[in-house]
Amino acid sequence: MFVVMARTAGEAEILGVKSAILGEGLTPYDHVGAERTVIAVIGEIGSRKAALMSRLGGLGGVESVTPISRPFKLTSREFHPENTVIRVLDAVVGDGSLTMMAGPCSVESRDQLFETADAVAAAGATILRGGAFKPRTSPYSFQGLGVEALRYLAEARERTGLPVITEVMEPNQVDIVAEYADILQIGTRNMQNYSLLTAVGRVARPVMLKRGYGATVEEWLMAAEYIVSSGNPNVILCERGIRTFETYTRNTLDLAAVPLLHHLTHLPVIVDPSHATGKRWLVKPLAIGGIAVGADGVMVEVHPRPEDALSDAEQQLNLDQFRELMAALVPVHEHVRSLHADPVVSGAALGIGGSEGLGKH
Ligand code: PEP
Ligand code: MN
């Protein structure tokens, strides 16, 4: 449940509500919004619900107490109506600007990374990607350069000024990856690795959580809830395609998830058309589609010589193709930005306690 404080509520009244919640053995999380403070009550409430609602509702400074039927709380728009805006170095994600994450699937060498980094930075990328620890379907495939790649990524950041994002696959890698990278990526195969989610929830680095290829939107938001409830509010969601019966594309890009997420959550949403399609020539139209439906940005794989890439050779753009993609996306983003200015989110922001079904069928 959420305790909505009156606009006039002061510090002492907010503290009073929080200590009442703690006294019940539950945890209060407060969000200080532009207009008012909302306090989420987290924990197993069970049969205490009615009594607790009326008790908290009677405390000083409380305007209303709202039961929330959705399982995700801290990531929901009801709790936090304004968009979450994440700043890393000079990049800003979620403020309406176009976030472009670009770089190779895998960091293969210093030269390959620097050549890519220089080109994508010059073309307007805002964040540099590159895999150091690679989750490969086959144990015989290239597994990534590991810590050596992390060092190259840090050098590429110095060179270009771009923050870097790279995947962390295990809880015991979190500290070393966080030492070198600016944003930690959780890959599709690890979306429900709860010990990893909790571990990245404890570090002071934004996290990009890719959607599990078999995960529902609700399961995805619950995974994000693990990270936020562990103490890290800076989570970016990345739609990278889900597995369906279709085989022409590597996955099926769920574009409906983008406006749906903007409705359900305050977290920024990125679309990855590279892993979604698995085909170079499909990346540009799907990137445009992602921006058109209101995504905060795109992640694409770029390699100076994609045909020689050690991983995902068929889906990486070459440097010219990335420049063409940027030239196409910037005007689309400019145009679409005015269309999406508010309506997508405002309905949800107003609807505290709203309950449109997330029915199963
Ligand atoms: C990646 O972005 O490097 C990656 C492995 O993607 P995914 O987890 O979406 O397959
Ligand atoms: Mn890849």
Image: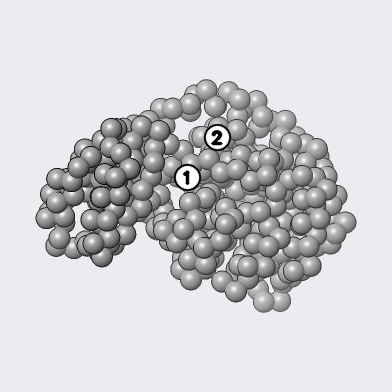
The residue singled out by tag 1 in the image is 267
In this rendering, would 169 be left or right of 214?
right
- Check disc 2 and give the amino acid type: Asp
Q: Secondary structure at mark 2?
A: loop
Query: Does label 2 or label 1 sit earlier along the sequence?
Result: 2
The residue singled out by tag 2 in the image is 95
Residue 262's image quarter?
top left
In this rendering, would 93 be left or right of 164?
left
Q: Which residue extends farthest front?
A: 12
Q: Residue at x 23, y 62 (%)?
A: 23
Q: Residue at x 50, y 34 (%)?
A: 293
Q: Nearer the viewer, residue 206 or 18?
A: 18
What distance separates the C-alpha of mark 2 from that of mark 1?
11 Å
Q: Nearer the viewer, residue 58 or 76?
A: 58
Q: Nearer the viewer, residue 24 or 359?
A: 24
Whether residue 108 is visible to the viewer of this picture, yes or no, is: yes
